[in-house]
Image (cartoon, grey):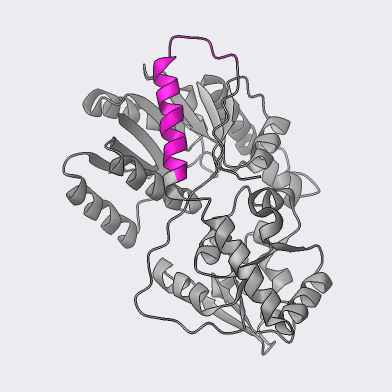
Amino acid sequence: MRVLLTTDTLGGVWTYTKELTEGLLQQGCSVALVSFGRLPSESQSAWCSRLEEAAQGRFLYVASEIPLEWMVDNDMIVEKGEELLHSLVRTFEPDLFHSNQFCFGQLSLGIPKLLVAHSDVLSWADVCVPEGLASSPWLSRYVDLVQSGLNGADWVVAPTSCMMFALKKNFSVSSPSTIVANGRTVAAPEGSFERVLQAVTAGRFWDRSKNVTAVTQIRDFPLMVAGESEDVPTALLHPSNVHYLGFLPEPELHNLFRRSSLYIAASIYEPFGLAPLEAALCGCAIIANDIPSFREVWGSAAVYFKTSRELQTLLLTIANDRGYLANLQVQALDRARHYSSAAMTASYLSLYTKLLSNQSECYDHVLSLSTYVQ
């Protein structure tokens, strides 16, 4: 099977497509990966080069600076992307198109089109901008781009039922829809790590959805914060229990998880959440903000808080009961292992096969391929 796959270089979608690309290649597929948003970083380019060499002709990577639909300069992005994607259809000859950007679902490529909704601006704003987004030409273009892409897709996927529900609240989804949970693989550590009683969280201070500022209000419990430290408000730099580490490359971040006892997932908007999944795979217990998507992903394998005071109480309980902490760590790891790259890849391959075998038929049912475990 030959798959034309899109990604972006700015966030979690890159990690998701890395996992899926490697999984598809391991299953004998060929993949053409196209990135948008900005040119790849040095580490991203290095990964692509290693994969091109290892895949022996079954992997192609094309980098583009064409903006993403949520960016300010979102006009003409479909026209700019159409030429590139049509060129790849001609030269790579894919069997299907898997887009992780909404807008390209509207293109007529002559092959089945699967569209994945990782997040969207309107559902983000519903949670993070209570006053609502101001009307603007940019926002109108964004809404049109998303809706046009959804209208043209043969199938729509989301990583959680919560994300699919949020998408359908703001947009019309007439195509069949499916939940396929994200999967993650964490490389084995080089050497051993001594785990200490400390919490860790990761996020950008400028992104209000990550709610990092609320976590830094805890006291009397060591907290390690990985993220863009230059954005830390001055008022938050003084607590002696909070340590700001700045941006950490993936290997360093995973080693931080292996040295920590628990991960605080504080987001108020999180369609899935790869960082807590990585932390759990590294042995951390999960303490999560009590939002529906975290409940869906983690179930009883995490403990939940609604306020900073509840979070503080949970941390003190854990500090005084190491047996409780150890049990939480075991539960989180067991749950995290269900969200494997192998399971995600298998789900997408099943869906690809369905799309290819029925591409001339009218879909009239919803296929359940979720890797979420009740």
Residue sitting at x 55%, y 29%: 156
Quadrant placement of the C terminus = top right
Quadrant placement of the N terminus = top left
**Location of residue 136 (image quadrant):** top right
Q: Residue furthest top?
A: 361
Is 124 contained in the magenta span?
A: no
Q: Position of residue 363 (x, y in %)?
A: 55, 14
Q: Position of residue 190 (x, y in %)?
A: 34, 75
Q: Position of residue 120 (x, y in %)?
A: 61, 41
Q: Is residue 67 visible?
A: no
Q: Is residue 49 visible?
A: yes
Q: Please name whichever residue, 324 or 42, is drawn nearer the observer in this view of the structure.
A: 324
Residue sitting at x 44%, y 14%: 358
**Location of residue 227 (image quadrant):** bottom right
Side of 30 where 205 appears, left or right: right
Q: Please name whichever residue, 120 or 65, is drawn nearer the observer in this view of the structure.
A: 120
Name the chief secondary structure element in magenta. helix
Side of 94 where 292 appears, left or right: right
Q: Please name whichever residue, 322 or 134, is drawn nearer the observer in this view of the structure.
A: 322
Above-or-below relation of 188 to 60? below
Side of 67 where 277 appears, left or right: right
Q: Please name whichever residue, 106 or 23, is drawn nearer the observer in this view of the structure.
A: 23
Q: Position of residue 91 (x, y in %)?
A: 22, 27
Above-or-below relation of 106 to 14? above
Q: Which residues are magenta?
A: 343-364
